[in-house]
Image (cartoon, helix red, strand yellow):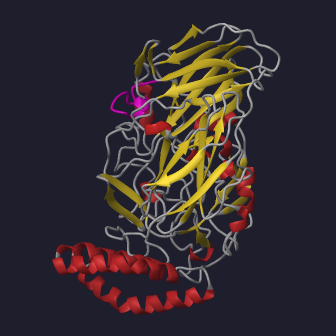
Amino acid sequence: MSIRHFRALCGAGLILAGIPWALPSSAWADGSCRTLEVRFQPQGFPKTDREPQSPQIAAWVEDKDGHYIDTLYVSRTTGLLGLGNRSGSPVLKSDFRWPYGKRPYVLPVWAHRRNHTYPMVVMGGKCSPNCGGDAHNGAANPDDENTVAYHGSVSSADPFFCSPSHRIEKQVDGVDVVSCASPFYSSKGHFDANRTSLYPPRADIDPTQLGALDSPDLARYAAMNDVAAVSGATFANGQVINPPVRWTVTGTLPDGDYVIRVEVNIENDFNLPWWAPGRSAHDEYSTWDAGFGGQYLGQPSVVYSVPVHLDAGNRGGLVADYEGYGDVTGDTGDLHPPDMTIATKNGSGADRLALVTDADGNWRVKVDLVSALPGVAPPPPAPSIDFSDITDSTIKVNLRLQDGSNGATLQVRYREALPITDQSFDVALPAPAPTAAAGGVLSTQLKGLLPKTTYYVAARAQAACGATSKLASASSITQLGQFTTLSGCFIATAAYGSPMMRQVGALRAFRDRTLLTTPIGKLLVASYYATSPPLAQLIDGPGPGDAALRSLARSALGPLVDVVTRIAP
């Protein structure tokens, strides 16, 4: 039975349950504002053989007739890092902080309702389009959207993403941590003048830091991204978001009926009707090595909708059931009514947001409206910043609101190597929302950082009606990396240009099947990982001298590859 036929047989669905209530009355003076607060509790689902990607969430406002008004929040991977519009075919698999494979189906209802188009990003770099063969990696075209290999001639250092073969898996304070182990070089693409996307390109690349191999189009990426300012870090699972998503409603918005919608999607959230592992239609098109990447295209996005009413009475609302689900292909913004194909428990499908019970009732999304008058108090003072618990991949950021902040919330962003200014604040990476610690200190943890690297952090306090403090900033350096338990072959990957190359796979198989099965072999592997990252980084540089080093490294590794291929074919 096809998925389409299965859906047709499962038509009995849930009905939207928006429950409005009245809030305290207030007279709106000229120039007054209202702050709308949206609350929900994300939750994960049981782990598969791979860690699920962080949930992608968008929250936006429509009028009662379904016309889009404004976006309140969008997760940083979609809103800031270009998940919906980046290099690579949509059929490429996924892994931890992997940069390839555009996802037009990540938040399709939000994208189509917003209906803002951008040039489509496709694989390539400075020489694109139609680079021709890649002299470094062979005859393949580095503009090929269907492969993650052969892009050496258009790949430069990436400020955020990393190769799944260049990551550390270890424990920090008893918690499993996955982080990038060394700099990664990726194809960041260029614009296809003949195609468009409903998603913005990534905005975290500073135009002044473009590499010699990057397309000039990259200088336009950040300027085109108009949702970076409302992009935020993924919310923690298992707790109601705090602070809530906020939106300041000015006096220019007429009183009346509106709808707040929240769309949620999670990679590899499989169930039987929706792309169960092992039966995905896109398997045959993926060029991924079987040892990297995982299936991701599970159940489609789900949408929760809350009706609200703006007037002197201020009516918010809450909802317990989802309104419908999005298009699994992303081709349309259709909202399909609830049916039995969408899971409803264990954090999967419609249960991606937890059911919360409080004095107002049972809800998955709750909207409150509060009032405030701008200009009554000056902008809050800037917060203070310091650091603690610094490791090779994490930094704890400690913040303190100053006297006179009057209930302001904190916005915190960070980035590698470059200071953050008022002009670049919106395109820096959002940090997780700070939480309260002892002594009035708020703290947030930056994770997945590169070792021995300078990171800049900036923060500002924001009052209820949007007035912000001056920017506070500071910097810290992560510790030297401890390369102990790694999943990749640094030098071989640098020499051959990609972890997907046949030669790298042969060496990886020899390591796993032969060396790691003996005490002496384990010692050799540990010694290799302790010494190889700096040499691999030297070999993997973009300069002409580095090309000679890569050729020399391949010549040195060739005889070993021949031997291990016979031992572990």
* 302 relative position to 82: left or right: left
Residue drawn at x 66%, y 35% is: 462
Residue drawn at x 54%, y 53% is: 90
Residue drawn at x 61%, y 65% is: 417
Instruction: Indicate yes or no whether the magenta region holds residue 339.
Output: yes
Which secondary structure class fits the magenta region best? loop
Judging depth in this view, the residue of 454 and 269 nearest the camera is: 454
* 484 relative position to 419: left or right: left
Q: Where residue 336 appears, x then y in whole percent?
A: 53, 27
* Up-down relation of residue 520 to residue 32 (above or below): below
Note whether residue 569 is visible.
no
Indicate the quadrant where residue 143 lies: bottom right
Residue drawn at x 68%, y 67% is: 209
Indicate the quadrant where residue 403 lies: top right
Judging depth in this view, the residue of 32 and 529 nearest the camera is: 32
Q: Where residue 406 appears, x then y in whole percent?
A: 63, 28
Q: Where residue 27 appears, x then y in whole percent?
A: 74, 9
Residue segment shown in magenta: 338-353
* 86 relative position to 97: left or right: right
